[in-house]
Amino acid sequence: MKKIESKVTYEIKGLNQERAFNKLTKEVTILTLERKDKHISVLEVAPKDAKKTRKFLRNNNFEILSEKSQGPYLWRKRFLSCYGIILGLALVIVGYLTQINVIWQIKVFGNDKLAASEITAFIEENMGSRFISQFNTKQMEIKLKDNFERLSSVSVAIIGQSVVVNVHESLLPDEMTTIYQPIVSEYDCMITKIELIQGTLAIKEGQIIRKGQVLVEPYIIDSQGEKRDVKPMAKIEADVWVSGESEHRDSYYKRYRTGNKVEESDITLFGLVIYSHKAELKFSEYELEEKSENLNKNILLPFKINKKTYYETKTELIEREFSEVEQEKIKEAKEKALLYLEEYEIIKAENVTIKSSAGVHIVTVTITVSREIGGV
C-alpha cells in the first residue's frame, strides 16, 4: 500500500524562475517541480519547509496563486481547528453553567423616602455569597426590617439572576406634620369626571375653571367635626382647551437684502492701523456687520484684522388681502395649538375665531381634548 506523504503544494507566477529555484534548493528540499508554462510553475515541499518557502517566494517577487496542504499534515491542521472550536464551545458552556447560579443585580421597588442605593448597599454587605443557592431571602427580610425603621413590610425574592425587593414605608411623625399643598389646575378647562381619593373637593362636574384655580383642598373634616390635614389625591378628568394664534396685516413694509455687498478691512498692531482697505459705498440702505480676529495665531505680535461688510437692503410695501391667505393662517394657528397636545391625545373639538381691526387680522384655533388634571 502506497504511503500517503504530507506535503504543501504552491502554484506560483513570476519571472526568472530557474535562477530562483536553484537558490531555493539550497535552502529547502523540493519534492516535485512542474513548469506549466513560461511564467507559471507548481512545486511541492515538505510541511517543515512550507514557511521558509513561502517567505522565499514573496521576497523574490513571485505571486502565489494557490497554496494547498495534503496528507496527514492537512488532517492534523483540520483536527486542531475543529478541536479549537470544540474547546471554545466547551468553555462557553462551562462559563454559562457557572454564572447561571450567580446573583448579578438587586432591584428595589416601592421606596419613596428611602434611597434604593441604601437598601442595595445593605444587601450587598450582608448577603455573604452571590450564589443563588446560598442566599436566604427570609433572613434578608428580617435584616432589612431590623436595620431600617421606616420599613413597615419587606418582601425579598429571587427572580432569574436578580434579587427583587418590594418595600412599604411606614408614616413617621415628621411626615405627619408636613404642610400639604392643594391640587390646582394647570389649564383653562371644564370638569367632566371626578374621583376623589383623599381631601376636600373645591369643584364639581360640569364646572368651568381657570388655570391656577384650586381643585382639591389638603384637608378633611373627620367624624368629630375636626379639620385634619391630609395629602390631597384625586383622579379628575376635564375638557382642556389649548389654542394657537397667527396674525396677518393687509399691508406692511418688508426689508430684505438684495445680495449686493461692499467689504472694508484694516490691520492694526497695538491698536494702530498699519494697513487699510476702503471701498466706495453707494447703497442708500444697508445693514452693517463687523468682525475682528487675530491675523495669525502663530505670530507673537498682536496683529488684528477688522472687517466691515455692508449689505445693500431695500424696503418694499407688501399688500395682500386676508382672503388670499386665510386658510394658510388657520393652518399656521392650528399647528401652534397642536404643540400643546400630549402624546396620543385625541381631539374632541376644534374651533376657529377671527378678529379683524384696522387691517390686522388675528386667527385663533382652539382645540378641545380630554385630559386627566388631578393628582394621585
Image (tube, grey):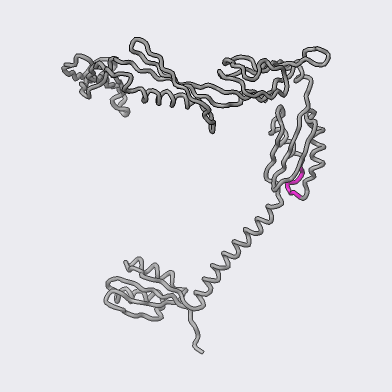
Callout count: 0
Q: Please determine whether, in this image, residue 74 is positioned above or below residue 298.
A: below
* Among the 4 quarters of the image, the one containing residue 22: bottom left
Q: Which residue is the extreme one toward the bottom? A: 1
Percent across and percent down for residue 357 are 37, 10
Percent across and percent down for residue 114 are 72, 29
Q: Residue at x 38, y 18 (%)?
A: 247
Q: Nearer the viewer, residue 182 or 273?
A: 182
Task: Give the prevailing secondary structure in the magenta stretch.
Answer: loop
Visible residue check, residue 124: no
> Which quadrant would the C terminus be assigned to in this image?
top right
Q: Nearer the viewer, residue 109 or 75?
A: 109
Q: Please determine whether, in this image, residue 6 is positioned above or below residue 199.
A: below
Percent across and percent down for residue 345 are 54, 31
* Among the 4 quarters of the image, the one containing residue 93: bottom right
Q: Nearer the viewer, residue 47 or 349?
A: 349
* Residue 322 as seen in the image, left or right of residue 341: left
Visible residue check, residue 3: yes
* Among the 4 quarters of the image, the one containing residue 286: top left
Q: Residue at x 35, y 66 (%)?
A: 59
Q: Is residue 338 magenta?
A: no
Percent across and percent down for residue 283 are 19, 16
* Residue 355 as seen in the image, left or right of residue 190: left
Residue extent of the magenta highlight: 127-132
Q: Nearer the viewer, residue 87 or 171?
A: 171
Q: Residue at x 52, y 71 (%)?
A: 78
